[in-house]
């Protein structure tokens, strides 16, 4: 049973956050706890991009970004995974510098100091050298950078299916068992070689 923190940042790409929460809700039998923190911009982007406020209808514990009494603000609560999706470059820079100015960055600090798993899903493009160096710093201290770069070999038909090609990889990384398209595991290969 896993205890997971989900930080939803202010980058564009709310569809990724939605599909992540949908998938976690579908696999609650593998979860002991899910704590969610959304930045103010994350809520704005969700409403702007998805046209609703359904982020508060998931069966998880939601915390204000300034609530340092949240259990995962301390390593003693033993949350073993954290996913930031989408992760803005501003957040990524603060994480790399060790700046704990809200609950999301404090939880990242806790996850890293406890040598637990942090998965960052940045969506920005193109990337500056500052972004790349911040990613290097975070990778060197154990974080996994999983860019929101969807794949197409499963022939996704909707935006949600396209976003799921990223989110299913993220959930693979944190050890959630799920049914998803996997390369060469079906009898039909998308490309016929002559």
Image (cartoon, rainbow, N blue to C red):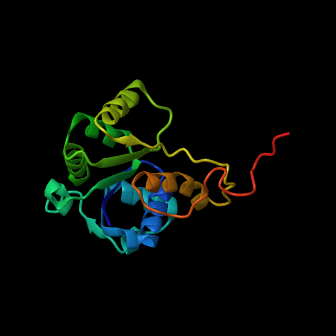
In the picture as drawn, the residue positioned furthest to the top comes out as 129
Residue under the point 37% across and 47% down: 119
**The N terminus: image quadrant:** bottom left
Q: Position of residue 107 (x, y in %)?
A: 23, 52
Q: Position of residue 96 (x, y in %)?
A: 27, 35
The answer, for residue 122, to whether it is visible in the render is yes
Q: Is residue 90 above or below residue 8?
A: above
Left or right, residue 46 beside residue 81? right
In the picture as drawn, the residue positioned furthest to the right comes out as 194
Q: Is residue 177 above or below residue 118?
A: below
Q: Position of residue 144 (x, y in %)?
A: 38, 42
The answer, for residue 74, to whether it is visible in the render is no
Viewer-proximal residue, 89 or 112? 112
Residue under the point 45% across and 44% down: 146
Residue under the point 38% across and 50% down: 10
Q: Position of residue 163 (x, y in %)?
A: 55, 55
Residue under the point 51% across and 56% down: 168
Viewer-proximal residue, 157 or 66? 157
Viewer-proximal residue, 119 or 16? 119
**The C terminus: image quadrant:** top right
Instruction: Tell me which corner region of the image, top left, top right, bottom left or bottom right, holds residue 55.
Output: bottom left
């Amino acid at each position: 049973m896993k205890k997971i923190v989900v930080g939803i940042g202010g980058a564009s790409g709310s569809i990724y956050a939605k599909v992540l929460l949908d998938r976690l809700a579908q696999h609650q039998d593998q979860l002991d706890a899910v704590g969610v923190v959304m930045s103010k911009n994350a809520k704005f982007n969700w409403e702007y991009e998805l046209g609703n406020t359904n982020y508060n209808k998931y069966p998880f514990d939601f915390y204000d970004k300034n609530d340092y009494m949240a259990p995962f603000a301390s390593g003693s609560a033993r949350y073993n995974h954290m996913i930031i999706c989408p992760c803005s470059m501003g957040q990524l820079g603060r994480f790399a510098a060790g700046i704990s100015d809200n609950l999301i960055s404090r939880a990242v600090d806790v996850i890293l100091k406890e040598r637990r798993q942090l998965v960052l899903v940045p969506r920005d493009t193109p990337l500056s050298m500052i972004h790349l160096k911040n990613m290097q710093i975070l990778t060197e201290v154990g974080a996994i950078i999983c860019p929101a770069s969807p794949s197409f070999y499963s022939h996704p038909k909707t935006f949600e299916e396209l976003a799921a090609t990223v989110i299913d990889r993220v959930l693979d990384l944190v050890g959630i068992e799920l049914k998803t398209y996997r390369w060469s595991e079906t009898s039909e290969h998308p490309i016929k070689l002559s």
